[in-house]
Structure formats: structure tokens, C-alpha cells
Image (cartoon, rainbow, N blue to C red):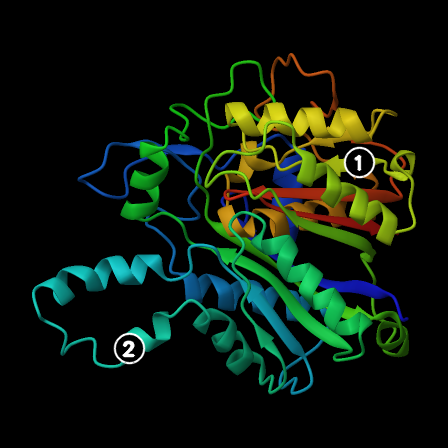
Amino acid sequence: MDSVVVTGIGLTSAIGENLEANWQNIVALKTGIRLQQPFSELTARPLAMIANQPVELQKLTQLVVFSALQDAGINPPLPDCGVVIGSSRAFIATWEKMAPDIYAHRTTQWGNNWLNSLPHMNAVSVARQIGATGIVLAPMAACATGISALIQAALLIQTGQCVRVIAGAIEAPITRMTITGFAQMGALAKTGAYPFDKHREGLVLGEGGAVFILESAKLAKQRNARIYGKVLGFGSTADAYHSNSPDPEGKMAVAAVKQCLKRSTLEPNDIDYIHAHGTATILNDEVESRIIKHVFTHRPYVSSTKGATGHTIGASGAVGVAFSLLALKNQILPPCVGLRETDFDLNLVYKAHISRIERVMCFSFGFGGTNAVIALGT
């Protein structure tokens, strides 16, 4: 079975429009979180927005996809390229705009445009953008969407269905319904995001996404492509426990980590760095800390970049993978921005520093108990 490698990355978040800007800003401990009020009827909250107004999903997707293609040195049309582009919130902002007109029976202005806002249409638009006429998938797995997309893409290559796949997740979650929903759950922070901090308050919603060009190692070698890293293995499970609370024991999250290790033919002490889900909510960080300590007794480095980018919901795992691959490339550990004081017994990264990194793992644990884990190596 040919190995799967990453040859291109597109990344946009509140701390940078492109890959290099994101890396430079995360290393410098900068954050894109600001107190903002995009909707006059809602109170101001800390948000990680790309611009002064909420970004539009399809425009953001086009930007990130273009960046990934450019980074990989390939140009459309790409008829044989698979497409696996996910989003947890999808076009909810569009539906919020349509709702008042629908209730008032003013539907003529929308016509059939509502069809373009169905959940899978962002992936379809990417296929049109790059001229892909093969497999198109649009995973939705809550906060595990990004890594789930990469798992599906890797499987397409490993099973010989594709030799190249563009995969990742994009999120534009700054909408009235999303903010109100998370607020009613009591999950939102009041001042900022502080993953694994003793005084963490909750999550901060963030815009952004990451898209990757995955190829068979054979194809990458044939075209002499630059390789960021290899997909070593992955794991995916479900808690089947609660709609928004993680299983306090983290049993199936641990199972996902162990699946990933087994498929990667790795032992726990082979992992040098873990990009944690690290949402800065009370429950997530507590349970995740327990999971890491249970499996990884050798104390690998751990950080979460959500203190800088905010929680990009379905895109968060993809964003974490992008930072993990940059860590491998630069041999620098990305810091846990916002962390000042902790009571967790983890080897947390307070400041970026050089370290030998050969194998990393990235976690995503989503609402509803969707768990996805991926291992990457040089």
C-alpha cells in the first residue's frame, strides 16, 4: 500500500491570511481574538474574526483552496483529483438571511438559490473550482470534521480510488444562531480563550479553515513535490454518551488514540508532540488532560492553538493539522497561546521553541462524542 503524503497547505484564520502569516504569528504568541459585536441585537463577545464583518463561507473556501493548490505547485483543471471538503456549520449564515423572507412568504427573490446553500454544496463548489470530476465528499462530524475529512481522503488514496485528493474543512461560524446556541449552553468565554489554563472560561468562536493536497508518495516523487509530512495513521470513534458533554472517562477517545497508534505501527512514546483539541472549556480540557496522561506516560509536548485562532469548530482539526505539519517542517513547537498558569500535569508548551520532532498527533473531540485522531510524521 502506497503511503499518503501532504504536498500543499492552504490556511487562513484570524491570525493570518496565509500559511506563513499564521506560523509567524502563532510563534510570536499573537492572538486574533478581539471583543467584537457583529450583530447589533447581540452583546459584544470575544471573537476571532478574519475581518470586521463575518466572512462568507464560499469566498473563504475559494481563497484557502487556491492557496493550497499554489503551495503544492499544481494548477486546475484536475479532473482526477478527489474532493473531501467538510464544514460543521456549512451555510447556516445564508439560511439565517433567508428565514425572515420565508416566514413572510417573500421567496421569489431567492428562487432556486437556496439549493446552493445545502450542506454539501461547498464541496461541490470546490470540485467546480478545480475541475474535479471524480469523487466528492462533504463530511460533517461536529468539531471532528477536519480530521474526518483527512481520514476519508487518506483512505481514498490507500485503497487506490485516487492518487490525489484535496481535503480539509472551512468554517464561517460567526452567525446569530451559532453565537446564541453556544451562549445558551454556557460554553462561551467572556474575555478570551485560555486552553488548559487554571482560569479558563470557555471557547471563543473563530473563522477560518485549512485545506491540504494529499497525494500518493509515488505521485509526489514523480513530480518532485515538496513533502510536508506523511499520514502515518488515524483513529475515529463515537462516545454514544451525550449530545454536548464528553464522556468523563474518555473511554472512546482513548480508543481512537489507540486505534491511531496501532494503524501507525507506533508506540505511545514514539509521539513527540500532541496538538490537543484544547477548547478552553472546563470539561474538554479536564477530560483531554486525563486522556493524554492515561496513554502517554512519557510526557510528550502538548499545546492547543485555539487561544490564537479561536475555535474554528469543524475546521479546528484541519487548522491543528496545518500547525502540526509546520511544526514538523520547522522543528519548532507551537505554543499554547493564552496559557499563563495551569493545574494540569502535562508538558505544555508556553513559548515556541526548537525541538526534535519526528512524529506528531492531532486530536479532535467534537460535540456529540465524535472523536478523530491523526498521526503525522517526517
The residue depicted at 60 percent of the width and 87 percent of the height is 133
**Is there any visible trace of residue 299 in the rendered image?**
yes
Q: Residues within 10 Å of mark 2 (few under 14, many from 20)?
A: few
Residue plotted at (60% across, 55% down):
146
> Closer to the camera, 139 or 24?
139
How far, Cα to Cα, is label 1 from label 2?
45 Å
**Residue closest to the eye, 318 or 327:** 318
Pick out the residue farthest to the front. 240
Q: Position of residue 11 (x, y in %)?
A: 60, 55
Left or right for 272, reference 134: right
**Kind of element beneath mark 2:** helix
Residue 53 percent across, percent down from the top left: 32, 49
Position of residue 129 in the picture relative to residue 6 (left or right):
left
Q: Earlier in the sequence, mark 1 or mark 2?
A: 2
**Outermost residue toward the left?**
104
Question: Tag on residue 113?
Answer: 2
Q: Let me know if residue 9 appears in the view.
A: no
Q: Quadrant of residue 180?
A: top left
Horizontal and vertical percent position of residue 307:
55, 31
Residue 73 figure quarter: bottom right
Query: What residue is at 69 percent from the left and 22 percent from the top?
Result: 350
What is the total number of numbered labels drawn onto the structure image?
Answer: 2
Q: Amino acid at mark 1?
A: Tyr
> As shown in the figure, which amino acid type bears the numbered disc 2?
Asn
Using a 10 Å C-alpha cutoff, classify the residue at mark 1 as few (fewer than 14 neighbours), some (14 to 19) or many (20 or more).
many
Q: Which mark is residue 141?
A: none
Element at label 1: strand
Q: Identify whether 76 is placed above or below 374.
A: below
Q: Name the residue tied to disc 1.
A: 273
